């Protein structure tokens, strides 16, 4: 074990170390009735939320660990609601 890291597990469930976070996440989703959602979806959500809050792409890329714009673009998605708002801005009521 690398120096400086605790020898006791950080994440536990019922007193035992969680060795497979992905499996535990999937089990929690199943218990909650959540379908078609994977742990990695949190990354997409965080990136889109940061963008909607007005943060610039370069800061978001630094926070998310993306080194290139092409990889960043895979995670940065624009919703239909955002597109409707963009188109409706120029319309007169």
Image (spheres, helix red, strand yellow):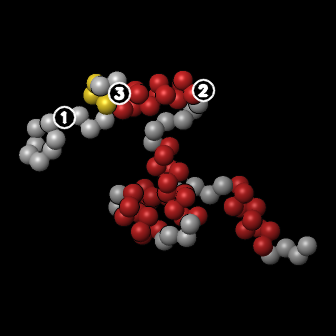
At x 78% / y 73%, what residue is drawn? 89
Say whether residue 66 is visible. no
Say whether residue 90 is visible. yes
Determine the secondary structure under disc 3.
Answer: strand
* Dots 3, 2 in contact, CB < 8 A: no
Q: Which residue is mark 3?
A: 13
Q: Is residue 3 left or right of residue 88?
A: left
Q: Which residue is mark 2?
A: 33
Question: Tag 2 or tag 3, which sits nearer the N-term?
Answer: 3
Looking at the image, which is closer to me, 38 or 30? 30
At x 66% / y 55%, what residue is drawn? 79
Figure quadrant of residue 16:
top left
Question: Tag 3 or tag 1, which sits nearer the N-term?
Answer: 1
Percent coordinates x, y for residue 37 in the rendering: 54, 35
Percent coordinates x, y for residue 59 in the rendering: 41, 68
Q: Residue furthest left?
A: 3
Determine the secondary structure under disc 1.
Answer: loop
Q: Residues within 10 Å of mark 1 (few under 14, many from 20)?
A: few
Q: Nearer the viewer, mark 1 or mark 2?
A: 1
Percent coordinates x, y for residue 41 in the rendering: 50, 43
Instruction: Look at the picture and state if 4 lies above or below 91.
Output: above
Q: Which residue is mark 1?
A: 8
Q: Is residue 51 left or right of residue 7?
A: right
Instruction: Look at the picture and state if 93 lies above or below 1.
Output: below
Q: Quadrant of the C terminus?
A: bottom right
Question: Tag 2 or tag 1, which sits nearer the N-term?
Answer: 1
The label shown at residue 38 is none
Determine the secondary structure under disc 2.
Answer: loop
Q: Residues within 10 Å of mark 3 (few under 14, many from 20)?
A: few
């Amino acid at each position: 074990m690398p120096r400086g890291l605790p020898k006791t597990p950080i994440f536990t469930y019922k007193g035992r170390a969680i060795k497979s976070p992905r499996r535990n996440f999937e089990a929690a989703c199943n218990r909650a009735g959540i379908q078609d959602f994977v742990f990695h979806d949190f990354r997409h959500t965080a990136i889109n939320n940061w963008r909607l809050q007005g943060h610039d792409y370069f800061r978001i890329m630094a926070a998310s660990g993306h080194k290139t714009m092409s990889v960043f673009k895979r995670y940065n998605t624009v919703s239909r609601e955002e597109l409707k708002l963009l188109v409706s801005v120029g319309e007169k009521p």
